[in-house]
Amino acid sequence: MPVKIGIPRALAYYAYYPFWKEFFQKLGLETVISQVTTKQILDDGVKEAVTDACVPIKVFHGHVRDLKDKADYIFVPRLVSINKEKTVTFCPKFLGLPNMIKTSMTGLPPLIDIRVDLKKGKLELFKICYRLGRKFDVGLWTIVKAYSSGMKAQAKYQQLLNEQYSPIEAVNILDGEDSLLANSTDPKLKFAVLGFPYTIYDKFVNVDIINKLRKLGIKVLTAEMVPPKILLQQAKKVPKNLFWNFSNQVLRAALYYLDNSKVDGIIHVTAFGCGPDAMVDKMIELEAKQRGKIPFMSITIDEHTGEAGLMTRIEAFVDMLALRRERS
Ligand code: SF4
């Protein structure tokens, strides 16, 4: 029986899952993903996590709980940096994630809590993979092949995002399932819906905002649909980089959509209790006001977010922008 590696369907899952899944499988290990977020998972997470944690962290705890009896190891990496931008790191909750899990939860299988700090050098990711492979007694050649397959899977995934598939759709396609673009081909409006991937693509957490907008005839564009090269170019428009990886992506995507007039409106989905989000939200609002062309709305989610209240605000925003379009 192959060793089972549990991967929580939360946080970094929405950005780097194709690489890790492919890598572990090519090492000869089995990957087990926690089920999609449900009320039970959220409730478990709320019980396990420290009370002042943001909702994505609580949800992560719930997903780890879901994997407790399904896997031999649970993958909880300590993400420090994934690119060469020297001042950019992940938010403190990501940095301390393995410690949070170990301190708050008991009875878990061992965690794979590797530190991912790619600023250390070009070969750092391979070195991490090598150490992981050796942990499971895998030979060098197999590790090299698994690493290379992982990189290819991640590149294919990025390509699909650039073609405006959402991460969920892209993962489905990589897994060989048919997935058509759910965006309307003749949308009445186009919106950029921005936020951390784990708040934007976890349908339970954000009460399925993307599909709700699509049902209203809105084409939804997200930060992940802007190619990384173009995102990086937007960095020149702000005097200073933010410290946090995902926050930079959101702000840069907002600047891109604001300056290219590609959308009729921008919705920023923020997590209650998130320090980085509070700052990014204000920055996007100011940038949108300065340009004065594209309306901006902010939505804050937490574990008590109700569908009715959220939909009322979204529908009002859509109606207002549809009227604006008609008049212009
Ligand atoms: S960036 Fe914000 S939402 Fe994400 S884990 Fe950190 S505090 Fe939570």
Image (cartoon, rainbow, N blue to C red):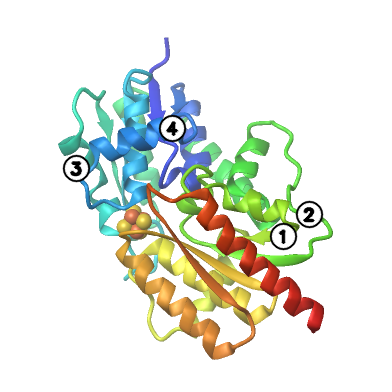
Classify 95 as above or below 146: below
Please report contact status of discs 3 and 1: CB closer than 8 Å, yes or no: no
* Callout 1 crowding tier (Cα within 10 Å): few <14, some 14–19, many ≥20: many
Residue 230 in picture, x, y percent from top left: 59, 71
**229 with respect to 247 (left or right):** right
Helix, strand or loop at disc 4? helix
Of 168 and 278, nearer the camera is: 278
Classify 174 as above or below 134: below
Toward which corner of the image does residue 121 lie, by quadrant? Answer: bottom left
Residue 56 in picture, x, y percent from top left: 37, 48
Mark 4 residue type: Ile
Residue 126 in picture, x, y percent from top left: 40, 44
Q: CA distance from mark 2 to mark 3?
A: 43 Å
Q: CA distance from mark 2 to mark 4?
A: 42 Å
The residue where tag 4 is placed is: 143
The residue where tag 3 is placed is: 99
**Mark on residue 219?**
1
Mark 1 residue type: Lys
Toward which corner of the image does residue 49 lie, by quadrant? Answer: top left
Q: Nearer the viewer, mark 3 or mark 4?
A: 3
The residue where tag 2 is placed is: 184
Of 128 and 314, nearer the camera is: 314
| Residue drawn where x is 41% and y is 72% of the image | 280
Q: Is mark 3 within 8 Å of ligand 1?
A: no
Mark 2 and mark 3 lie on one chain; the one further toward the N terminus is 3
Placement of the C terminus among the 4 image quadrants:
bottom right
Q: CA distance from mark 1 to mark 4?
A: 41 Å
Please report contact status of discs 3 and 4: CB closer than 8 Å, yes or no: no
* Callout 2 crowding tier (Cα within 10 Å): few <14, some 14–19, many ≥20: some
Q: Nearer the viewer, mark 2 or mark 3?
A: 2
Mark 1 and mark 4 lie on one chain; the one further toward the N terminus is 4
